[in-house]
Amino acid sequence: MGKLRAAINPWAILDKLKTDEKKLMISMQILGTAMIAIYSPTQSSKKRRAIPIDISSNADLRAFWMSEIGEQISYCSAEFLALALSRYLNVQTKAQAKDLLALRLDEYGAGCITLANFDAFVGGRPLMEAMMELGLVQVLPFAERSDLGTKSMLPDTNSITPILVLVDDNPENQLETLEHARALGVDRYVFKSTAAAKNWIEWNEDMLRQADQMNRLRIMSDNSRWEEDIDSCQKSPEPSMNLRAGETILRYLRGRQYRAPVLIYAGLSMPMTNYVLQYSNSGSTCYQEVVDSFLDGLLDPEKADDGWWRDYDVVPKGSVKPLLIWVDDDIGGHTFSLEYAKSLNIEIVPFVTTDAAKLWITSNEIILRRMEGAHLLRFISDNSRLEGPFYVGGPQQLNRGAGKQFLEFVRSNGYLSPFLIVCRNVGATRYVCDHENAGSTRDPQVLQNFLVFLAERRSNDNSWKGCGT
């Protein structure tokens, strides 16, 4: 499929060649320093041979590299470098340290970190200072450092003007987006190239860091755009199609520890945006409705943002069916209710055992979190059911606590969606009163209302809550 796409779209070939060129330059750098290290001249010389570590003038970095990596070594993996830094600096690094190093110091995904890149990042600073800036060291979150009194220093969220950074080589395509942002009172900063956006971000870091910490920053980018390749070997590079422009800016932001939501807006290149699944707090779409919802989250992230946009190729919520997870060992006995739910355009996922339901829920966590955030998810379970056999050839056993166990599993995994126990003996379901957004019933009308509320995507219905409604 990749070869077919390249044959149809020659820009895919050019973009692949550009990426390969950058990786090749890094590989040549590694090879060159390796050859210097092993080259032995035929004529004797009193001059000291050049070695990789000579490229650095930072005494702190040189001492670390010679001690932990080796003066003859010009590169290493991000994982090895993270462990070496932790050992040398005698600090505990974050679990994602190797990912942070790779994002920042291996920008083109060559698979290793060169001494040259590491030295360029550290510069003349102490090694610890550079690692603190990168966010490698495990310390208290900024807002929790009581010794600095930062809680009192943090401004009120409402005092920070929300910011939208938009990167698109043809901003006219985003006039509707910019107008919606303007109507929301959002400051808009538009750039036509990755290089221009990066330069502005670095010059305005203090403002952006504060906005990022207060959840008042969001970034949008097209996926592909015409840009001048400033990294090209050509002296006067001509504009070329960058088919990875969206991932480039996303990787750049995450490498510099920006947590702000990032949305990639794409058209025909949508199949190439599945990289968003590899990065936190990011998504891709071609729908203006999703973009508007993404921007609405700037007003009140905790209430206005349901996170629906956090996925690959996101479609509007209105085009997605509500989801009902129903667990009952006699699911066929609810034919009328099942047909009624289908008539309401509800997608039903039925199970006859708790274990099967648990496995499916665990395997589909990403979509279920999004469905819950959009009020498109509900659960139904019977109270007791036959389960097993629990060993080969064994009989099934009646589990009288099946409903309670499934409810506790759902809640312990952080799902707060409506949960209804449907059974005859509602007197045995008082446990639902110990859980928020839960109820039990034997009344078919209550069950129907529960389904209607799901179809209507309601979140404020209470008539079914409690024991024996």
Image: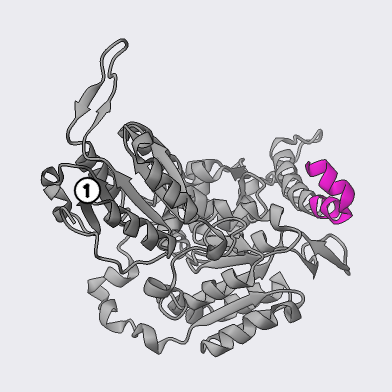
Q: Going 74% across and 58% down the picture, which residue do you hit? A: 269
Classify mark 1: helix, strand or loop: loop
From the viewer's perspective, tell me whether residue 466 is left or right of residue 94.
Answer: left
Q: Going 15% across and 46% down the picture, which residue do you hit? A: 426
Could you tell me residue 439's position as x and y percent?
A: 22, 54
Amino acid type of the residue tagged 1 in the rendering: Arg
Residue 19, placed above or below residue 145: above
Residue 204, placed above or below residue 130: below
Residue 442 in magenta stretch:
no
Could you tell me residue 425's position as x and y percent?
A: 15, 42
Quadrant housing residue 188 = bottom right
Q: Which residue is mark 1?
A: 442
Could you tell me residue 400's position as x and y percent?
A: 17, 33
Residue 85 showing in the rendered view: no
Q: Nearer the viewer, residue 286 or 193?
A: 286
From the viewer's perspective, tell me whether residue 415 is left or right of residue 69.
Answer: left
Q: Nearer the viewer, residue 351 or 369?
A: 351
Residue 54 showing in the rendered view: yes
Q: What is the span of residues highlighted in magenta in the rendered image?
A: 1-17
Q: Nearer the viewer, residue 98 or 396?
A: 396
From the viewer's perspective, tell me whether residue 345 is left or right of residue 109.
Answer: left
Residue 10, placed above or below residue 228: above
